[in-house]
Image: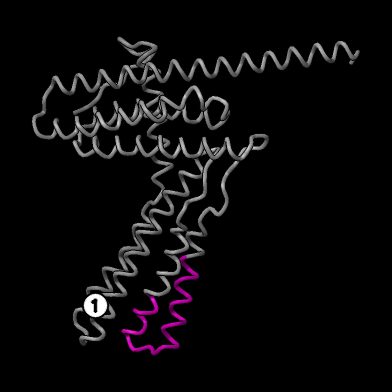
């Protein structure tokens, strides 16, 4: 079903419609950046499928080795795809911890092992298999590179505070991802768009906290308690709506998202105003000092 987008300058439009459309566009753009696996990573599953099919017509020992090699290549492709998504999320944040598991580099090693096994099953011998494995691992590393190996921090802010922000942000992003996963299974474009609009507003608060970790105290309840509640409500709604298609439950869920969205937006605006007030105070103090010193 088509969805009508309104706007400030469209018929029957409003400033609210325009703001929501902008928020939705921001959410979609961010989702595309984070889901950065793309066709290149998904194509890595193809060699595993080909190797498994070719192994069927080989002798028992080669069959077993071929299936093991295909499994290793599939695992390497899966790790690489997840590693690319983790790297995109890392790059999108101003404060972030490095991925706990270096998925892309593990994918490189497993790709080399899988290709070496594939070479051995075709009768190239141990030396040839090792050469193929090294070449395959090298090409994989050249194509996808290493994982982020250092935490991303901001200058002038202590490590403890940045670690607190990173933990809260990781937790908040996991709640938002869970909302998308459960509501997305309903395959309802309007519901997906509604959730995406709320997520854009929530991520605006997340980015505000990342830029100034001093805002974490005021935002922590929103990014932990409220988002956890939004996730739990999304799970229960998705389960109920999949069974009954209850219009009343859908209206209640959308009303909840609207209420959360308004509260998140208002809190974010207050944080930004507080930051502006702090900056104005610092500028005034600096000007007074310069005037006293005759500069």
Q: Main secondary structure of the magenta part?
A: helix
Considering only vertical position in the picture, is 237 above or below 10? below
Identified at 66% across, 37% down, the residue is: 155
- Where residue 51 sits, quadrant-wise, is bottom left
Q: Is residue 180 above or below residue 221?
A: below
Q: Neighbour class for label 1 at 10 Å: few (<14), some, many (≥20)?
A: few
Residue found at x 23% / y 23%: 253
- Residue that label 1 marks: 54
Q: Is residue 282 left or right of residue 178?
A: right
| Quarter of the image where the C terminus is located | top right
Provide residue 228's location: percent of width, then percent of height. Answer: 33, 31
Taking the view exactly as shown, the residue that stands out farthest to the right is 294
Colouring of the image: one colour
- Numbered disc total: 1
For this orientation, the residue located farthest to the front is 160
Which residue is drawn at the image coordinates 24% and 86% (left, top)? 61
Position above or below: 197 against 64: above
Whether the magenta-drawn stretch holds residue 97 is answered as no
Question: Is residue 126 shown in magenta?
Answer: yes
The image shows residue 113 at horizontal and vertical percentages of 40, 75
In the displayed structure image, the side of residue 249 where residue 124 appears, left or right = right
Direction from residue 287 to residue 197 in the image, left or right: left
Residue 203, percent from left and from top: 43, 30
Circle 1 SS class? helix
Instruction: Give, as a single range, the part of the protein colored magenta.
Output: 115-140
Please provide percent x and percent y for residue 171.
41, 38
Of 223 and 21, which appears nearest the observer? 223
Quadrant that contains the N terminus: top left
Q: Measuring 42% from the left and 36% from the top, which residue is drawn there? A: 30
């Amino acid at each position: 079903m088509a969805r009508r987008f309104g706007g400030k300058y469209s018929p029957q439009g409003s400033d609210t419609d325009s703001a929501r459309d902008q928020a939705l566009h921001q959410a979609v753009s961010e989702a595309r950046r984070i889901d950065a696996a793309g066709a290149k990573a998904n194509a890595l599953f193809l060699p595993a499928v080909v190797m498994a099919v070719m192994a069927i017509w080989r002798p028992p020992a080669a069959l077993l080795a071929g299936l093991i090699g295909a499994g290793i290549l599939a695992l390497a492709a899966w790790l690489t795809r997840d590693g690319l998504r983790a790297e995109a999320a890392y790059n999108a944040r101003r404060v972030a911890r490095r991925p706990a598991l270096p998925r892309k580099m593990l994918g490189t090693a497993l790709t080399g092992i899988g290709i070496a096994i594939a070479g051995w099953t075709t009768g190239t011998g141990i030396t040839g298999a090792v050469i193929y494995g090294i070449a395959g691992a090298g090409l994989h590393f050249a194509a996808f590179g290493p994982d982020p190996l250092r935490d991303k921090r901001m200058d002038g802010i202590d490590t403890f505070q940045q670690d607190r922000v990173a933990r809260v942000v990781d937790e908040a992003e996991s709640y938002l991802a869970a909302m998308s996963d459960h509501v997305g299974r309903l395959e309802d474009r309007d519901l997906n768009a509604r959730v995406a609009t709320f997520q854009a507003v929530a991520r605006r608060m997340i980015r505000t906290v990342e830029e100034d970790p001093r805002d974490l105290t005021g935002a922590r309840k929103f990014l932990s308690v409220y988002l956890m509640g939004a996730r739990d409500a999304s799970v229960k709604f998705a389960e109920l709506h999949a069974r009954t298609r209850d219009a009343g439950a859908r209206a209640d869920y959308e009303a909840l998202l609207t209420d959360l969205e308004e509260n998140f937006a208002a809190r974010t605006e207050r944080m930004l105003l507080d930051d502006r007030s702090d900056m104005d105070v610092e500028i005034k103090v600096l000007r007074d000092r310069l005037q006293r010193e005759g500069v």
